[in-house]
Image (cartoon, rainbow, N blue to C red):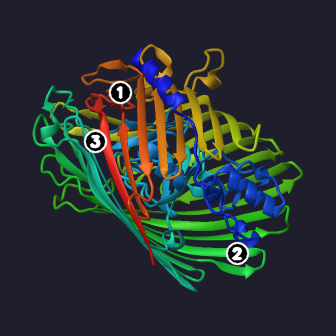
Amino acid sequence: MKKILAFAAVAACLVFAGEALDVATMTEKDIAKLTYAQLMEMPLEDLMVLADKLGVSVDDLLNMKISVSSKKAMNTRESPGIISLITEEEIRNSGARTLMDVLRLVPGFEFGYDIDGAIGPGMRGIWGHEGKVLLLIDGQEMNELLYSTLQFGNHYGVANIKRIEILRGPGSCVYGGFAELGVINIITKKSDDLNGVSASVSASTMANDFGRTAVNFGVGKFFTNVDFSVTGTAGMANRSDRPYIDASDYYYGPESDAAKETFSNVNANVNIKDLSLRLIYDRYATRTSDYFDGETPVYNSFDGYYGEVKYDIAALSNLTVTPKVNIKYQIPYNFLDERYPYDRSALRFSGNTIANYDYSEKLNIVAGAEGYYDYATDRLDDPESVFGNDEKNISYYNVSGFAQGLLKLPHTNLVAGGRIDGHSAFGTAFSPRLGITGPFEKWHYKAIFSRAFRAPGIENMNLPSPDGTEITPERTTVFEVELGARPTDNMFLTLNVFDITITDPIIYFYYSDNDGNDVEWYENQERSGSTGFELEYRIKYGWGYGNVTYSYANPHITDKFDFFDKNKVPSYEVPGKENMVLGLPQHKLTLNGCWLRGSLSINPSLIYISQRFGSFGNGIIDKEKPSLITNIFVQYKNLLTNNLTAGIGVYNILGQKYDYLQPYYVVDSDLPPHPGPSREFTLKLSYDLGL
C-alpha cells in the first residue's frame, strides 16, 4: 500500500515547468544558431515568439539536429536511429548525482554488478558491460581496452555536461566495435557555455554513512579566433551504507569501507579557428571485498589519459573534410594487492578522416577511413605474468572504411550505409545499415535494419578457451520500427519495437581447479538477444515539462518460432523462467517532471523496476522483489545574490533495499547481491561568474 500511495503522490506532482528566457531581442540570425537542446530548455511562450519571428510553426522550430546516429546532423524524426536527448536544464533540475541517475530515466537502461566493485550497464534486457555499449565524452571513447568494459557507480559526474545524446540501438556502422547495442554521447560545456568561471559543490548523507561529496569547476572564454575551456570534478562516494555478506558469509559493514569510491576528471579544450585540441584525464577507484575471505577490501583503480587533434577543412562550399588523431592510455582493473596482483596497461593510437559532401539539397554522402594500433603491457615484476604469446607485451591493429548515403524525398528519407573492419587477429566484420524514415507535420515513422558487431577486447583474445578455440567477434542483427505523434505543439508520443539477435556472443567462464588455481577464459556461445518495445510520452508547456516512459524486453517471446527464442547462453538463464535473464528486469516504468515558479523548481521522479533474478552465492539463484525508487529535488536560483543556486533533494524516499545483481552465473564466481544506496539526503551549491 505504501508503494501505491508513493506512486500516486509522485504522479500527482508531475506538473511541468520550463525556464523563462528573454527572447524579444533575438534576430533571425541568433535564432538560426540555436540548437535543439537550447530550444527544449525554453517555455512554450518563448518558442511561439521565436517561431513567429521566423514565420514558421513551433513544430518546425523544434526540429532537433543531432549526430549520434549518423555523422550527418539530422532531425531526430528523420535520423536512422532510436534517439534520446537529455539537456543541461533537465539534468540540473533533476538534481542527478551521477550519470547513472540520468540513464536510469532512459527507456531500456538498467545496471548490474560484475566483479571487483564494477557496476556495468544493461540495455534492452541484454547485459552490455563488456564492449556492447559505447560511451563517448566529447568524442573520446571511454571504454577500457583490455576487457572493453565501462565502470559506472559514482564514476561520471554530470555538473559540466551540456547535453547527452543516446542512440538506443546499434551504432557499429558509424562507431565500430564497442557500439553493438547503443551509444551514449556526452557533450560537455564549451567556452561559450561557460563564458567565465563556474564552481559547484555537493554533499550527501545516508542513514548509516556519508553518501558522496564532490567539487566541480569550469573555466572558459571565447576570443575572436581562439577559445578555451577547462572543466573538472573530484570527490569521494559510498556505493552503499548497507552491509554486504559475501558468498563465504563474511560480513562487511559500513565501517569496513568496502563500498568506498573516489573519482576525478579534468577535460581541457582549445580551439584555434578550425583546429581543435583536447586532453582528458580520468580516474576512478572502487573497492572490492570479493574473494578476500573477510580481509581488508582492496582498491581497484581505473586510470585513463585521452588526447585528440582535429581539423575541419572546408575544401568546398559543400564539402568538409575532417582529419583527426587520437591517443588513449589506460590502466584498468589495477590491483596492487599481493593476494590478486594485476597491473596491465593498454595504449591505442588511432587516426580518422571523414568527408561530408552535400551533392545537392536532397543528397548527402558521408565517407571515411580509420585505423588504430593497440599495444598492451604487463607491468608486474613477475616473469610468469605474461600474455598468451608468452611475452610481456602484445599488439593488434585494425583498419576500417565506412560510407553512408542520405536521400531526402517528400515525406520520405532513405538511408543506406555500411562499415567494414579488418582486424589483425579476428579478421573482417561488415556492419550495414538500411533505413527509411518519414517525417510528417504531426507524426513520423522509422524502419531500420542494422548489423553490428562487438570486437573482442585484448584480454578476451588473450584468454581463449581450454580447447584452443579462438575468439571471433559477436555478430548482431537488429530490426527497429518507430512511430511518433505530436498531438499538439507541446506533446510528443513515440513507440518503438525492436528485435535483437546476437550470434556468437562472447561469454566469460571461470573455475578453481583442484589445486586452488584460477582458470578463466572466454568463448563464443550460440546466441542471445531480446525482443521488446519502448514507449515514451513527453510534454512541455510554458509552466512545465515532464515525461513518462515504459520499456519491456523479453528473450523468449514464444515457443512456436525458434527465431524468438533468443537466449541460448546457459550462464544468462533463469531456471524455470525462459522469458527472463539474470540480473535485469523485464519491465521498467519511469516518471520525471519539473515545476518552476520564478526562481524555484521542484523535480519529482519515480523509477519502477520489476522483479529480477540473480545469484545469491554458492550456486543459489533466487528472486529479487520489484523496486519503487522515488526521488525529489528542490532548487532555488539567485539565492541571496545573482548566479548562486542552491538545491536540496531526497533520493530513494521510501528507503527501498535495492541491490545490484550479477547478470550471469559462473561456477566459483557467482556473487551475492551487492547493496545499493539507502535513503540519501543531498545538498548542492553552484555559482557562475562571468568574465
Mark 3 vs 2, N-terminal side: 3
Q: Is residue 381 visible?
A: yes
Say which element carries label 1: loop
Whether 173 is drawn above or below 608: the answer is below
Residue 92: x, y in percent? 47, 52
Q: Is residue 504 left or right of residue 348?
A: right
Q: Choose between 246 and 691: the one closer to the eye.
A: 691
Locate residue 353 relative to residue 242 in the image: left or right: right
What number is the disc on residue 320? 2
Count of all numbered marks drawn on residues in the image: 3
- Residue that badge 3 annotates: 239
- Circle 1 is placed at which residue position? 654
Q: As shown in the figure, which amino acid type bears the numbered disc 2?
A: Thr
**Is residue 612 depicted above or below 519 in this figure?**
above
What amino acid is labelled 3 in the image? Arg
Secondary structure of the residue carrying tag 2 is: strand
Q: Is residue 49 above or below residue 44?
A: below
The mark that comes first in sequence, 3 or 1, is 3
The Cα atoms of the two marked residues, 3 and 2, are separated by 46 Å
Is the C-beta separation of discs 3 and 1 under 8 Å?
Answer: no
Q: Earlier in the sequence, mark 1 or mark 2?
A: 2
The residue type indicated by label 1 comes to Leu
Q: CA distance from mark 3 to mark 1?
A: 18 Å
How many other residues sit within 10 Å of disc 1, few (<14), some (14-19) or many (≥20)? some
